[in-house]
């Protein structure tokens, strides 16, 4: 065999190897989802969407998406939990979320009411939730999604306020995160 043949064979082998590696990498990026990061507390855990992070602020957990400050301002999730009492049930949560929220205008002027778009029951994972959408209830010109549920000993409220133009992306991520919620029962 001549040296030209060996060089051509070796070159063809390297080119084929590079193409197969590239194709395998591309297929892996498309077909295999990134593993989620679990967020765990003393009473619950759930899987964060890629890049999201949460921290305890006072008595609530505040979660934000990845990115710089302008991207983080596009969405914020607040999770509150409390020991359940006789007023904590899905029917009471549903009735409460059907009412528009009141807040003072930007200059302390007229009282502003949120617009209630919908309130419905929804199953995420193995848990039944009350889901609602209000416009302008927490932050002016933002859509706020509410998810509320109860366990045998906790009442849970999750709110996500999101800019209208970022809604589809972040609502999908919130739904995926909350569908993995596991509350530790006593």
Image (cartoon, rainbow, N blue to C red):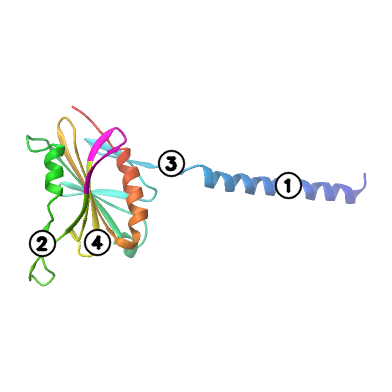
Q: Which-is-in-front pick, marks 4 and 3?
A: 4
Image quadrant for the C terminus?
top left
Pick whichever of labels 1 and 3 is earlier in the sequence: 1
Q: Nearer the viewer, mark 2 or mark 3?
A: 2
Q: Earlier in the sequence, mark 1 or mark 4?
A: 1
- Per the model, the C-alpha gap separating discs 2 and 1 is 65 Å
Seen at 50% across and 42% down, the residue is 32
Coordinates of residue 31 in the picture (x, y in percent): 52, 43
Query: Is residue 122 shown in magenta?
Result: yes
- Label 2 crowding class (10 Å Cα cut-off): few <14, some 14-19, many 20+? some
Q: Label 4: state its secondary structure.
A: strand
Q: Which residue in the protein does label 2 denote?
A: 103
The residues bearing labels 1 and 4 have C-alpha atoms spaced at a distance of 52 Å
Going from the N terminus, do you reach mark 4 or mark 3 first? 3
Q: Tell me which corner region of the image, top left, top right, bottom left or bottom right, holds residue 164.
A: bottom left
Residue identifier under label 1 = 16
Report the residue marked by disc 4.
Answer: 142
Q: Which residue is mark 3?
A: 35
């Amino acid at each position: 065999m001549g040296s030209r043949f060996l060089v051509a064979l070796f070159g063809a082998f390297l080119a084929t190897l590079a193409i197969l590696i590239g194709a395998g990498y591309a297929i892996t990026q498309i077909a295999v989802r990134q593993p989620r990061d679990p967020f765990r507390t003393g009473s619950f855990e759930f899987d964060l969407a890629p890049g999201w992070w949460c921290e305890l602020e006072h008595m609530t957990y505040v979660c934000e998406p990845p990115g710089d400050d302008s991207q983080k301002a596009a969405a914020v999730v607040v999770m509150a939990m409390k020991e359940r009492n006789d007023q904590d049930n899905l029917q009471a949560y549903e009735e409460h979320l059907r009412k528009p929220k009141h807040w003072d205008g930007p200059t302390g002027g007229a009282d502003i009411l949120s617009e209630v778009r919908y309130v419905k029951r929804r199953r995420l994972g193995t848990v039944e939730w009350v889901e609602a959408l209000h416009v302008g209830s927490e932050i002016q010109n933002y859509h706020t999604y509410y998810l509320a549920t109860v366990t045998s000993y906790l009442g849970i409220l999750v709110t996500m306020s999101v800019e209208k133009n970022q809604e589809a992306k972040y609502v999908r991520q919130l739904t995926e995160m909350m569908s993995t919620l596991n509350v530790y029962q006593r």
